[in-house]
Amino acid sequence: MRGIDIPADENVLVGIEGFEDAGVYKITDDIALVQTVDFFTPVVDDPYWFGQIAAANALSDIYAMGAQPKTALNLVCFSPKKFDISILKEIIRGGADKIREAGVSLLGGHSVDDEEIKYGLSVTGIVHPDKVILNEGAKPSDILILTKPLGTGIMNTAIKGRLLDKDRALGLAKVMAALNRRAAEAMLSVNVHACTDVTGFGLAGHLKEMIKDAVGVELFTDKLPYFEEAAGFAASGFVPGGLYRNRDFYKEHVVTSRTDFFFDIIFDPQTSGGLLMAIDPGDRKKFEETAVHLGVEYYIIGTFLEEPKGKIILE
Ligand code: CO
Ligand code: CO
């Protein structure tokens, strides 16, 4: 978007410049609209699961802003000449099931005749204008929490190599299709200073967006959650191209002497990953209690530091 003149409006609370998960527009002193759009090509073979994953992924950006999703529109690219229409039906059914689970209303959508299947949603949510959670704002000594395991990029690459049996592929699909709704609920029960969801740029990329050059972060390497089989698959070379791109782009911000699997997994691009949040250390117990009560999976994976600013420590 560089070089393009964007119209200015004082009601735009979060615009396109901050690499935020969604845009925020103030309507009244109590209500701001939160808007996002996300769609992509199939990540799994089963169209119903693809629909669920794509919808959960689009909804996630609303949760990451601390907002409540309210309405959604389907975005569909599909060629009825190339594919059986029942495939499209299953994709839409998967999306609709997730939309219903999120308590969101589907208002319509738009489809384009396209040889390459794509699906996703445009989602609108609401939030109090003073309670928007940004990806920046973490403070030194905040704890870093992640709510889904890493490694979906490596696992999806292994699926394409036919290395995962049906049961395991389904287990993976379930994690990707899980809404970040309850995780956001647990987050909103405490003092959260920053949040984003982990997607294409991997843990390291999204962490860099959080810390900018304002704070540093130390990862608890032995606490990083990941799909068990991912380490073996990565060792056998089932590594997505995006992982290498992320590593080339973000490695200068990572302080490490590691060259093992952990130097892969932090760069692995995630599909519909978990929330990554900076929580006030005094609220740790309350967060854990709420998360357990809500049945939210969570991992305390690091702590924010005053120094070195802008760096991710992986030792
Ligand atoms: Co996001
Ligand atoms: Co997004």
Image: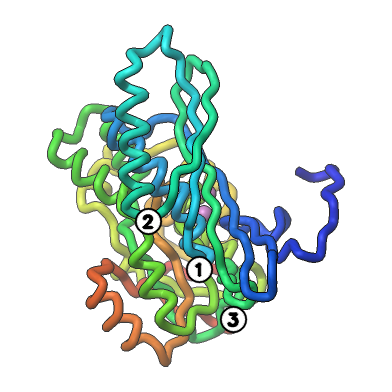
Relative to 216, does residue 175 appear above or below in the rendering? Answer: above
Mark 3, mark 1: which one is toward the viewer? 1
90 with respect to 282 (left or right): left
Could you say where residue 204 lies in the image, as x and y percent from the top left? 49, 59
Q: Is residue 190 above or below residue 4?
A: below
Q: Which mark is residue 133?
A: none
Q: Secondary structure at mark 2?
A: loop
Label 1, secondary structure: give it: loop
Q: Nearer the viewer, residue 187 or 9?
A: 9
Question: Does dot 3 land on a helix, a strand or a loop?
Answer: loop
The residue at the point 48 percent across, 56 percent down is: 70
Quadrant housing the C terminus: bottom left
Ligand 1 closer than 8 Å to label 3 CB? no
In the image, what residue occupies the spot 31% across and 58% down? Answer: 149
Q: Earlier in the sequence, mark 1 or mark 2?
A: 1
- From where the camera sits, is residue 298 visible? yes
Quadrant for residue 17, please give it.
bottom right
Q: Position of residue 171 (x, y in %)?
A: 19, 46
Q: What separation in Å lies between label 3 and label 1 (alpha carbons)?
A: 27 Å
Residue at image coords 53%, 58%: 125
Q: Nearer the viewer, residue 287 or 48?
A: 48
Residue 286 x %, y %: 33, 87
Residue that mark 2 sits on: 103
The residue at which mark 1 appears reads as 66
Q: Which mark is residue 307?
A: 3
Label 3 close to label 1 by CB (< 8 Å) = no
Whole-angstrom CA distance, mark 1 to mark 2, is 16 Å
Question: What amino acid is at disc 3?
Answer: Glu
Going by the numbered disc 1, the residue's amino acid type is Gly
Q: Nearer the viewer, residue 248 or 122?
A: 122
